[in-house]
Amino acid sequence: MRDFITGAEESERCLDRMVAALHLMMSDRQFCALMVSEGLETMPRLLAHRLPGAPPEPHVFCPPGKPLSDTGENREPIGGICPGVLDVLRDAPVKTKIFGLLQKVLPARQVEIARLMVAMDQVRLTYARMLVALTPQALLVKDFHPSTIANLTEGHRGAMVLEVGKLSLAVLGAMEQRGQVGLELVAASRFFARLMDNSRVVRYLARNYPGHFEEFHNLSEPFIK
């Protein structure tokens, strides 16, 4: 889980570097005029909204497996399984026993567990069992006791529930953020690649920003063929 969060944070830092570099360029009127003359004035909307003074971009990204409308918690369960779970796991090979475990928790927790399994690429019985066993008592169905699927003392389980709960929230937040940032990162990298593929732009940046030129070039590398 921590590696997933770290990856999302690294993507955000990379995007921040791109925005900082672009902000430096766009503060140069001569460079802006050069971009217009070279037909490079059209900036991706996903990138432009991050620049200072830009209007906020509406958040429309939906994490993989999560419908834009809702999580399915308000729809009628199918065999004790929230329909939102089926939406999330629709492209994953799921063992029947996983659904049996999910029936032990309330619909909101079912969806959360399904999203965590997909995010961590761990749609497995052992992972589902761990998440169900470490579900807060309030999200368990009546008369189900986690001790029936995990050999944990109540004190030990309580501590682990808190720790896993914090990590789970961070992972789900990173999952959503990573998706949006990923889209912006692709748009930004392609835009930088276009800039660095233009000989006049390259000469201008090398002459006027020698201390930043290597950074500009590195930011474009992922999409230079």
Image: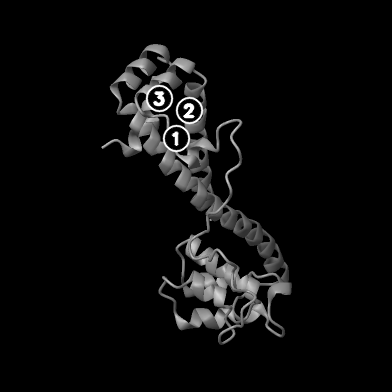
- The reply to whether residue 18 is in sight is yes
- The reply to whether residue 133 is in sight is no
**What is the distance, in whole Å, between disc 1 and disc 3 at their CAs?**
11 Å
**What is the distance, in whole Å, between disc 3 and disc 2 at their CAs?**
15 Å
**What is the distance, in whole Å, between disc 1 and disc 2 at their CAs?**
10 Å
Q: Three-letter amino acid code at disc 3?
A: Val
Which residue in the structure is indicated by mark 2? 22
Sequence-wise first label, 1 or 2? 2
Which residue in the structure is indicated by mark 1? 43
* Residue found 65% across the figure and 70% down from its top: 135
Which label belongs to residue 36? 3
List x then y, in percent, for residue 125: 48, 75
Q: Three-letter amino acid code at disc 1?
A: Met
Q: Quadrant of residue 223?
A: top left
Q: Nearer the viewer, mark 3 or mark 2?
A: 3
Say if 162 sits above or below 48 in the image: below
List x then y, in percent, for residue 64: 48, 61
Say if 17 sits above or below 142 in the image: above
Q: Three-letter amino acid code at disc 2?
A: Leu
